[in-house]
Amino acid sequence: MSDIVIYGKGKTGQSLLKMLQKLGKEAVLYDDTTGFNGSGQFDSDNLVIVSPGVPPKARGLQLARECGAKIVGELEFCFQYCKGRCISVTGTNGKTTTCEMIYHALKCNGVETRLLGNGGTPFSSQVLEIEEGETVVLESSSFQLKDCVRFAPYVSLFTNLASDHLNYHGSLEEYAAAKTKNFINQRYGVAIFNKDDTNVEKIAEKCVCQKMFYSLDKIDANCYFDGRNVVVKDGEISLAVAAEYLTEFAKHNLSNALGAILACYCVGVEPEKAIEALKSYQLLPHRLQKVGKINEITFIDDSKATNVHATVSALSCYSETLALILGGSDKGESYDAIFDNMKDNVILVVAVGETAEAVRQCGAKYGVDVLVFDDFKDAVIFCYERLKNAPGLIIMSNACASFDKFSSYEERGNYFQKAVRDIQSGKESN
């Protein structure tokens, strides 16, 4: 059997196999369900390259550790072959949007750029093609970072930190420890942190390279928004760039934009050029996406809110009367923060899916009656019937993963959007 074992036979595993073949190296694929491709067993000579999402307590990993095999993650393994400079973005929420914003702004300014990493194109699929002078924007999840030992991007960015993936990491402390791998090995370049997140500010104390901060309104940050201008400060440099269009962004997306502008600045793009580029950026679907309006009711798809922190952030964006749809598959989180922070404008809460009963019980602790439904479409129809006589919002912001009923948050969001269209067409036919 080959000395190199790729743990995981999905998209990343197949990508790693092709990468190793290009390097002239042999490898064998393994997962806990089907075992090795062919026969074999772990031994001390193995290099085990782990795909993201393989749980730390997976059976094969335990076997590999017991026999003394060397274990690395895909991100760690690929980084040694990357000739370009990396911008690595991590955080509980906002990673994808911030990466997309950085990538868009760099491309608009003629920077040779690739967008790789978590949830998209595996790093391993293109790393051998990357040339010196290119910039790689990496979305780096805690799954990818946890096994890193030498990973040190040129620019790291940390959006926020809240409880997530506790069913995977076991505790918030372990989750946070994985996230610190995004910057902990940096000795050159810049580490960027969200100054509005107290958890991130505390973690930033562990950073030994140059640090920069962004904020929605804190004037001691290196990049902030004063209501009309983006202000960038770096030593003796201080400039204000008009960006009134950013007032149309929800708070979390404004924060993401400020982080993206600062990251672009750190790789040589002038702030005014990055800000101008973001005018043409189109926000990604399923992230507080307005998907329809019937009478005075606006429907909002926030299926990408797969943890409690994301839902709390979403609710903070609205003062209008609204109905909230929660629920999905369990990630080991408490739902207290949703109800503890709930404003009076939330007049109806419904829950669907595997976590519906847990959500209902949590709401009851705070005096909130949560209605449980078997299907999202029934929940959407019920919310519309309750709100249809007055202006308001119906927002699906799940606070949970989608894997109880759907293959992805995108599929769940599309299902919600179809339910909205069905209500619309039913009304039009009456």
Image: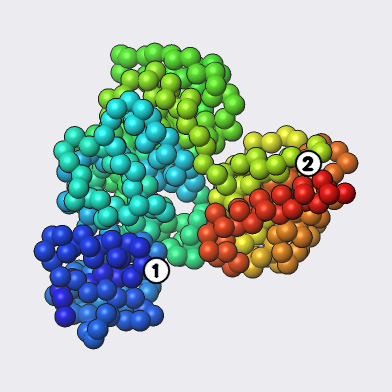
Question: Which residue is at 71% across, 54% downward?
Answer: 419
Choose top left, top right, bottom left or bottom right for residue 367.
bottom right
Given the image, on which type of amino acid does mark 1 rest? Pro
Q: CA distance from mark 1 to mark 2?
A: 44 Å
- The secondary element bearing badge 1 is classed as loop
Where residue 248 sits in the image (x, y, percent)? 59, 26
Question: Which residue is at 60% across, 67% downward?
Answer: 405
Q: Is residue 93 visible?
A: yes
- The secondary element bearing badge 2 is classed as strand
Q: Quadrant of the N terminus?
A: bottom left
The residue under label 2 is: 294
Vertical side of 254 occupied by 420: above or below: below
Question: Which residue is at 27% across, 25% downward?
Answer: 268
Question: Which residue is at 66% across, 50% downward?
Answer: 417
Q: How is the image coloured?
A: rainbow
- Which residue is more in the foreground, 249 or 144? 249
